[in-house]
Amino acid sequence: MKNYACLISLGLLLTACATVDPAADPLVVRVEQTQIAARQAFDMVLHLDDANRPFWRTNAPQFHLFCEWLRTPQPYSVGLVPRAVAIQLNVDDLKQAYKWSRTAGNSNALFSAWSVLNAAIIQTSAWSNIITTPVHP
């Protein structure tokens, strides 16, 4: 399990250290970096929980509840999608709108959506650290 935390950390490091076009919009760059990290982080914790839901439900119920929160269906234009997907799709839609118009209203909406995604990643990272850290007697 420790390998998952290492993979997420490596992914975040590589994403953060990637060469950025000097003319790139800083908000778009940060959003795109966060989107990459989100896919990796959400996939990792959901895969771990999926691998043995009864174990996590019994031995780490708050972690399991968090994973269920990420899975909770949310309305989106194509129908119901898991919350983890809906958050990412919302950010992507607002990023595209911002790229086309670059208005203050769109930047505020994009920043707000990015903040929600970032908070979910922070919580996901905290859980991945907790559940992948070996316990020594």
Image (cartoon, grey):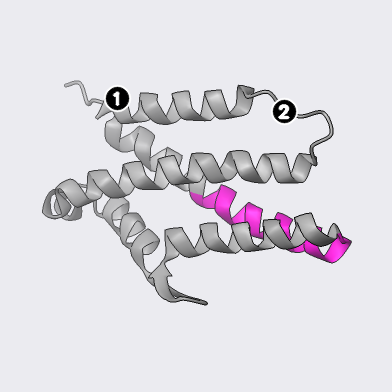
Location of residue 31 with respect to 9 vertically, above or below:
below
* Residue located beneath label 2 in the image: 20
Residue 98 seen in the current view: yes
Q: Which percent across, then down, holds residue 27?
A: 75, 45
Mark 2: which amino acid? Answer: Val
Are circles 2 and 1 on residues that touch, CB within 8 Å?
no
**In the figure, residue 61 lies in which quadrant?**
bottom left
Q: Earlier in the sequence, mark 2 or mark 1?
A: 1
Which SS class for mark 2? Answer: loop
Compared with 19, 66 (above or below) is below
Task: Give the residue type that dot 1 points to.
Answer: Asn
Determine crowd level at label 1: few under 14, some 14-19, many 20+ residues with C-alpha closer than 10 A.
few
Q: Residue sitting at 84 percent across and 61 percent down?
A: 101
Give the residue pinned by disc 1: 3
Mark 2 closeness class: few <14, some 14–19, many ≥20 residues within 10 Å: few
The residue under the point 83% across, 66% down is: 105
Task: Tell me where residue 95 appears, x and y as whole percent.
Answer: 69, 56
| Disc number lying in front (2 or 1) | 2
Q: Is residue 137 left or right of residue 61?
A: left
Q: Would you say 80 lies left or right of 135 here?
A: right
11 is within the stretch colored magenta:
no
**What's the magenta bit mostly, secondary-structure-wise?**
helix
Q: Tell me where the magenta segment starts and ends, as one range.
A: 103-120
Residue 111 spot, x, y in % from top left: 72, 55
The alpha-carbon separation of the residues under discs 2 and 1 comes to 28 Å
Residue at the limit of the structure toward the front, as seen here: 100
Residue 116 magenta? yes
* Looking at the image, residue 21 lies above or below residue 121: above
Quarter of the image for the N terminus: give it. top left
**Horizontal and vertical percent position of residue 31:** 65, 46
Observer-nearest of 69 and 74: 74
Left-right relation of 8 to 29: left
